[in-house]
Image (cartoon, grey):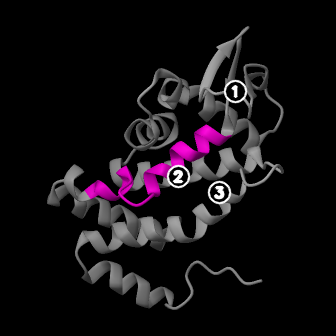
Amino acid sequence: MENRAYQGETPEQRLLRLQINPPIEAMETLLNSIDTHFNNEIRVTIAGDNYQTSLLFLGIHAVALTIAEAFWNQSGPMGYKKFVEEYMDGETSDKKFSKIADLIHKWRNVIAHQWIGSVGHEIGYDYEMSYGWEARDGVTLINPKIYCKSYLKAFSAGGKIWDYPSLFPESEMEEIKNRIIQKYQAH
């Protein structure tokens, strides 16, 4: 099996394409790449009965921070919360994941960087509950399926993430383009 997100262009060709075209090119390159490559792997984390919960949280968080840094120049807990508020929060209180964004961010840091941490006593998963999340006896339980579906809904046809032209004036879109190019060149 071969999986190459950047297949078809040399690094120089991609950089030139991002530089010479309007900001929408850089923004759509970022979003389309995430959706066609990364999100395919995120979808698998809740497929069938063999859940990959840690990978689900790591993957969604990586995308959230990537987009928050590119779109709003925000990183860390603030960037993650901004992404969740803009693209994932649902209509009901139990689907407003931004209310527990700090906890999820701390938990993702434990998963990604240390595995063992006291925040692990404050968070749990319940794939069967009908709520997106709820606090029970000092533990915040999250239904990872609902969390993941809230994330993927943003990328679906007509999803909030594709409405960026109405969210950003042209001057901000130019700044976004420049941040995307800077990140591309940095690594």
Q: Residues within 10 Å of mark 1 (few under 14, many from 20)?
A: some
* Residue at numbered disc 2: 152
Give the Cα distance between marks 2 and 1: 19 Å
- Relative placement, left or right, of 72 versus 62 is left
> 98 or 20: nearer the eye?
98
Give the Cα distance between marks 3 and 1: 21 Å
Specify the segment rendered in magenta: 145-164
Q: Residue at x 30, y 79 (%)?
A: 19
Which secondary structure, mark 3? Answer: helix
Which secondary structure, mark 2? Answer: helix
Q: Is residue 51 shown in magenta?
A: no
> Mark 2 is on which residue type?
Leu
> Mark 3 is on which residue type?
Ile
* Residue at numbered disc 3: 42
Query: In the displayed image of the protein, which residue is found farthest to the top?
Result: 137
List x then y, in percent, for residue 128.
Answer: 74, 31
Image position of 179 with respect to 57: above or below: below
Which mark is drawn over residue 129? 1
